[in-house]
Image: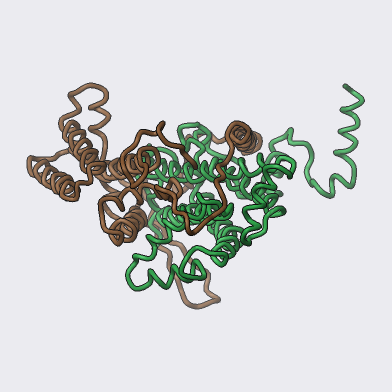
Amino acid sequence: MSPLPPLDLIESADPLATPRRVALVRPDRRPAVRTTDEKYVMTFPNLIVREVILFQLVVVGLALAAIAFDAPLEGIANPLETPNPAKAPWYFLGLQELLHYFPPVVAGVLMPTLVIVALVVIPYARINQTAGPLWAGAGPRRALALAAATGAVVALFGVFQCWPIAVPTAGIALAMFAARRGEQGGAFRRLLAKVTLPEWIMIWFAVVATILTVIGTFFRGPGWSFVWPWSHPLAF
Amino acid sequence: MPALDTAFRRLRESDVYRSIVRHGAASTNRNRSLLVFENLFLHVHPVKVREKTLRFTHTYWLGGIALACALILTATGVLLMFYYHPSVPQAYRDMKELEFVVDNGLFLRNMHRWAAHLMVFATFLHMMRVFFHRAYRPPRQFNWVIGVVLLIVTLLLSYTGYLLPWDQLAFWGVSVGTNMAKEAPLVGEKSRFLLLGGNIVSENALLRFYVLHCVVLPVALLLMLSVHIWRVRKDGGVQGPPEEPPQREEVR
């Protein structure tokens, strides 16, 4: 069944006019409000009780964490004594890790700005509204274009020797191509075959951001050299 | 215990109680409805909700966890403010006071810190959940944008709070971060100066971060969060996995 034709709201600038709504009613659809067979339940107690339980679980969990682990406190701030390494809070350590590979204006300004802009435009990009599975109805041209695009990203980060991005990008590109004709594969490949292009990009972003943050947090020591997490104290 | 039951019933039927809570016990659907829509705080909910929105996998309760953290942070934060002076070196001494003098002071600070980390984490996961459920589709596009702003406000809240203990970790963490801001073309140097009240992280920066952390950003969070939740309600409640293609009645 095709969707109902649009409703027309006849608007007037006259403050005394009553707004009129004109809708076309097709014989196969009743003018009644859209009915749904969805089941509804009372908000109290069904939702409210769940909310209260959730809040209590968070409080209890955090209280246990607060008993078990103390917040770090080092010596009083001293501008003359720079710790090595000097680290930002953990959620910025992905950016600080980027600083190791790129000039500060790229790592500290350009990349975060691009991320925020990309996040904001998500709901306004047509592809996010309409995208189907990446390989649905795709010919060899799409495979070629994707190979070129992912290859270019891997090469770009490879040139800057930024392996924490280049290697996962290559891995996700491989998964992307494993999804091609994945409908005939095992359960995991069938799952991959359903992923849309925007979702692949978001998975890539989340994986790269996580890897950079984990490296910056756990694997970086004096002079931003590679260290094992157990060889140095961690503070959050 | 009949005596206790009678006492409770008397209390609930008393004029004073009924002047405060204007509906009877929530044992009927009418009173359950009144309980929700006669309450300022609960009436952001509809009286009835779609049953499937209660499923764990519908939202994973991630927005709720972030909100719970915000409430806990407000409560513990206000208590911490009673013991804190945003000045050098008293700020650091106050940390020691919290640890060794104030009853449960360390617990309070621990809870505030872990709740802050959890809030950043939960907000990020909430964003991922909304993305993969495609819950940003019409009519919810702008609420996604508000959500991105809320993520940034959350990060800024955590970041401004990071300086307040005034220990080496705080000082250098904030120095590293604000040095990155300096690199922004044209506005970088100026905005860093504005943020720090000087060219380096100093007592002025501590005071500015304190005011941002305790007044400006919480108010911003409250306002944006109110709009965020209000719009969720107006758009028909929480949106789970996309079971049906997007459908909208075009009103022109």
**Which residue is found at the position 25% from the left and 51% from the top?**
A101
Image height check: is B137 above or below B199? above
Tell me where residue B182 sits by quadrant: bottom left
- Residue nearer the viewer, A204 or B186: B186
With A75 as the anchor, is A123 left or right in this view? left
**Which residue is found at the position 50% from the left and 47% from the top?**
B236
Question: Extreme front residue here?
Answer: A80
**Which residue is found at the position 89% from the left and 47% from the top?**
B16
x, y percent for residue B159: 50, 54
Colour option used: by chain
Image height check: is A9 above or below B130? below
Determine if residue B234 is in view.
no
In the rendered picture, chain A carries what hue? brown
x, y percent for residue B225: 54, 54
Tell me where residue A172 sits by quadrant: top left
Q: Quadrant of the N terminus of chain A?
A: top left
**Which residue is found at the position 23% from the left and 46% from the top?**
A162
x, y percent for residue A189: 23, 27
- Residue nearer the viewer, B155 or B68: B155
Image height check: is A92 above or below A190? below
With A134 as the anchor, is B136 left or right in this view? right
Tell me where residue B27 sits by quadrant: top right
Determine if residue A55 is in view.
yes
With B243 as the anchor, is A160 left or right in this view? left
Chain letter, colour green: B
- Residue nearer the viewer, A92 or B166: B166
Question: Extreme bottom residue here?
Answer: A14
Q: How many marks?
A: 0
x, y percent for residue A127: 26, 50
